[in-house]
Amino acid sequence: MGDLQQLRSLFEQQRIIICFNGPTHQALIGEIGKALKEHIATTEGEQATAMDVFSVYIEISQNIRNYAACRGYDDEAASATVVIAALPSSHYSVSAVNLVESADGQTLLQRIQELSHLDHQSLKSL
């Protein structure tokens, strides 16, 4: 019980509103996304913010699911952790971690480095 209280305290300190850890199944992604969207729309009163955060969450979760399926991972290897936190000034953080093959990780890092040098307009047109 003490561990759960510590976890709750950590979530409150980090302003985590949703945390999922486990295999990513399409139905579960959809249900968490729906709850996320409703929560943000209710607390923030802004549908646009809710849709933006929802879209990022869905994109990340589906990318993780598709990658795991492409690699033929079982449920354990296909597990991921997705965390959504409410930041000050109506901002949100959507973070995720999942198993990635080393070569794929290197390719991804290289692509991120290339994209990090682009300005907003270049990113948008890309």
Image: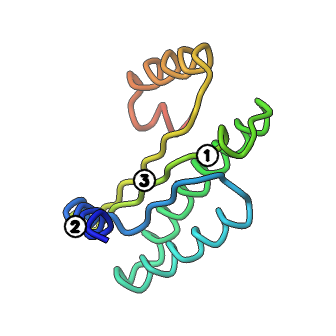
Residue at 43 percent of width and 48 percent of height? 95
Q: Tell me residue 86's x, y (percent).
A: 31, 65
| In this picture, residue 60 sits left or right of residue 83 | right
Q: Which mark is first along the chain, 2 or 3?
A: 2
| In this picture, residue 3 sits left or right of residue 56 | left
Is 79 or 92 nearer to us in this picture? 79
Q: Residues within 10 Å of mark 1 (few under 14, many from 20)?
A: many
Residue at 32 percent of width and 71 percent of height? 1
Residue type pointed to by label 2: Ser
Q: Which residue is mark 2?
A: 9
For the residues labelled 2 and 1, the Cα–Cα distance comes to 24 Å
Q: Which residue is mark 3?
A: 94
Residue type pointed to by label 3: Val
Residue at 36 percent of width and 54 percent of height? 93
Q: Residues within 10 Å of mark 3 (few under 14, many from 20)?
A: some
Residue at 24 percent of width and 61 percent of height? 10
| In this picture, residue 83 sits left or right of residue 98 | left
On screen, 81 above or below 122?
below
Is 57 or 50 nearer to us in this picture? 57
Q: Which label lies toward us, 3 or 1? A: 1
Q: Which residue is mark 1?
A: 79
| In this picture, residue 94 sits left or right of residue 5 | right
Kind of element beneath mark 2: helix
Q: Quadrant of the C terminus?
A: top right
Q: Tell me residue 2's x, y (percent).
A: 26, 68
Q: Which label lies toward us, 3 or 2? A: 2
On screen, 117 above or below 16?
above
On screen, 28 above or below 23?
below
Q: Are marks 3 and 2 in contact (CB under 8 Å)?
A: no
